Amino acid sequence: MNTRQLLDNHKLSITEGRMNILDIFLQSKVGLSETDIGDKLYRKTDRATIYRTLKIFRETGIIHPVSTEGSATKYVLKKEPIEHLHFKCTKCGDITCLADIEISGYNLPLGYTKLESNFLIIGICNECNNQ
Amino acid sequence: MNTRQLLDNHKLSITEGRMNILDIFLQSKVGLSETDIGDKLYRKTDRATIYRTLKIFRETGIIHPVSTEGSATKYVLKKEPIEHLHFKCTKCGDITCLADIEISGYNLPLGYTKLESNFLIIGICNECNNQ
DNA sequence: CTGTGTGCAAACACTTTGCAGGTGT
DNA sequence: ACACCTGCAAAGTGTTTGCACACAG
């Protein structure tokens, strides 16, 4: 998936800054916060700009938040709309999508409407367990 | 459930401040943040104290966080250890436990260990839908 | 050319920390 | 009496906003 294409699909103008940030998401397997992104850009991009970009990416559905546990909000690229788990490792701090695990078998009470969902498991990841 | 008893069960010393805060949790059906609690105490209690109390209640397992979406962390009393849903209404902002809905039917990948979990649905609650 | 994106600076919201004095056991 | 709780003040993060200039379409 190409960054230009992705921005265009979501009707966003194509700027260098947005492509850089999108690139970082495309290359990351874990959830990213403003700070994570700023670091990877060697802080050459203003924080306000990154926050604004994250907001727009979120609103247009390019990314979605996976966790805010404890501190900054972390985001990942939006995958298929299947409900799936996110996993936060308390040792390394990384947040990953367990996209192959689908959640099912629940019904909301009468009168409730679902817009979004976020299923987070907190624990120790495979890599940290094998150390 | 009595506040004194509850604090004692968790080996916490019984102070007026803690009983007040615990009372508020016992009487609330929705998740509460520091600000929510401070307001209900007419801001007679220092913010730092409330934050410290929330931290201790969380560490001892009296309460657990249900959402931080957008802003302050909200907590509810810990119920049975069954995994259940939390629901955040985007209209009224309230967060409630859907304690009668149990989540099941998923397995973590090999090597992953679960410590905690937090399943949040975001949408419109029954009351807000009927307005 | 015109609207939108960006950097800078300031402000705001949420949370934590050190210290001195007060309270629970 | 001693440990722990609390208030106060300050500081530390995370995030948003107004404005002037720069850039994309």
Image: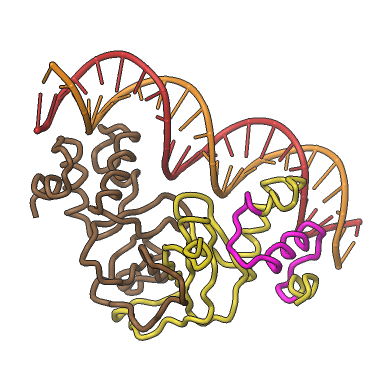
Chain colours: A brown, B yellow, C orange, D red
Residue at the extreme bottom: B105
Decide which of B126, B121 is in the foreground and name it. Answer: B126
The structure residue drawn at horizontal position 31% and vertical position 47%, both measured from the top left corner, is: A36
In magenta segment, residue B48: no
The structure residue drawn at horizontal position 70% and vertical position 69%, both measured from the top left corner, is: B26
Estimate the x, y position of residue A23 in percent, counting from the top left: 16, 47
The structure residue drawn at horizontal position 26% and vertical position 54%, both measured from the top left corner, is: A63
**Along the horizontal axis of the image, is B118 left or right of B61?**
left
Q: Is residue B34 above or below residue C4?
A: below
Estimate the x, y position of residue B123 in percent, counting from the top left: 42, 63
Q: Is residue A55 above or below residue A76?
A: above
**Along the horizontal axis of the image, is D11 left or right of B2?**
left
Estimate the x, y position of residue A68 in percent, counting from the top left: 43, 55
Q: Is residue B2 above or below residue A30?
A: below
Residue at the extreme front: B131
Q: Is residue B87 above or below residue A71?
A: below
**Residue B64, located in which quarter of the rendered image?**
bottom right
Q: Which residues are magenta?
A: B9-36
The structure residue drawn at horizontal position 25% and vertical position 54%, both measured from the top left corner, is: A61
Decide which of D7, A126 is in the foreground and name it. Answer: D7
**Along the horizontal axis of the image, is A62 left or right of A3?**
right
Estimate the x, y position of residue B117 in percent, counting from the top left: 45, 72
Q: How many marks?
A: 0
In magenta segment, residue B26: yes
